[in-house]
Amino acid sequence: DQQVKQNSPSLSVQEGRISILNCDYTNSMFDYFLWYKKYPAEGPTFLISISSIKDKNEDGRFTVFLNKSAKHLSLHIVPSQPGDSAVYFCAAPAGYALNFGKGTSLLVTP
Amino acid sequence: DAGVIQSPRHEVTEMGQEVTLRCKPISGHNSLFWYRQTMMRGLELLIYFNNNVPIDDSGMPEDRFSAKMPNASFSTLKIQPSEPRDSAVYFCASSPGTGDYGYTFGSGTRLTVV
């Protein structure tokens, strides 16, 4: 049973524009969320996180927004660059380990 | 630090054969995780070790799967006998300790069982 859901398998954005990746969760007990980024033939790497006591966390071009009432979070990338083309995973701690969404493949075109 | 090191990078084996995947975590990291990635199920946790002790193996799909961590610098995931449905990418990850979710993943082992 997927407790963390990424309903868009793929997204294509032009370079310089904003990329918005979405994630929904079902467990209202989740209190911490993370985004990981994965390039082909590599393992996922940690990108940014947010605690449930906040509704926004920013790190350079990357901002994560959390809407607890809607059980929804989103990752904004502004401006998008071709090097951002990767698969992005949303995750939340469940028990001892992270529970991952299935990922959204982002393609940033020149 | 070279990061989390997994071997082999690719493994092709015949159904029924034994497969052993290996992982060297980052030195000083006390938590180690094995994940499996498939198209259907995404990234799913197989087993979690803390200080070399298996804490949660509820994600191990069947008795054909086993994992060990004989010391702080080495872990194995074994499948015996392997089946075509075991084909997936297997990732090992480590973190400094319980509750630290900034995992460092290895590059993965792509397993193909024919």
Image (tube, rainbow, N blue to C red):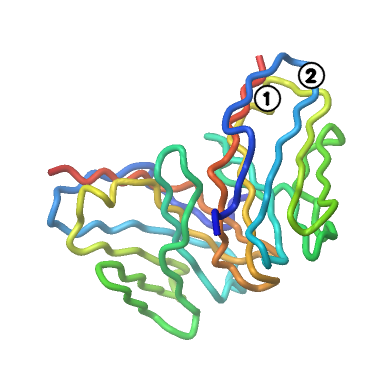
Residue type at mark 2: give it: Gln
Residue that mark 1 sits on:
B85
Task: Bin the neighbour count of mark 1 within 10 Å (Cα to Cα): few under 14, some 14-19, many 20 and up.
Answer: few
Q: Which residue is mark 2?
A: B17
Using residue A61 as the reference point, say whether residue A98 is left or right of it.
Answer: right
Relative to residue B6, is residue A58 drawn left or right?
A: left
> A13 and B99: which one is in front?
B99
Give x and y (percent) for residue A11: 28, 45
Mark 2 and mark 1: Cα distance apart in space: 13 Å
Is residue B64 toward the left or the right of residue A38 in the image?
A: right
Amino acid type, mark 1: Arg
Could you tell me which quadrant the C terminus of chain B lies in?
top right
Which quarter of the figure has residue B65? top right
Camera-nearest residue between B43 and A24: B43
Secondary-structure class at tag 2? loop
Total marks shown come to 2
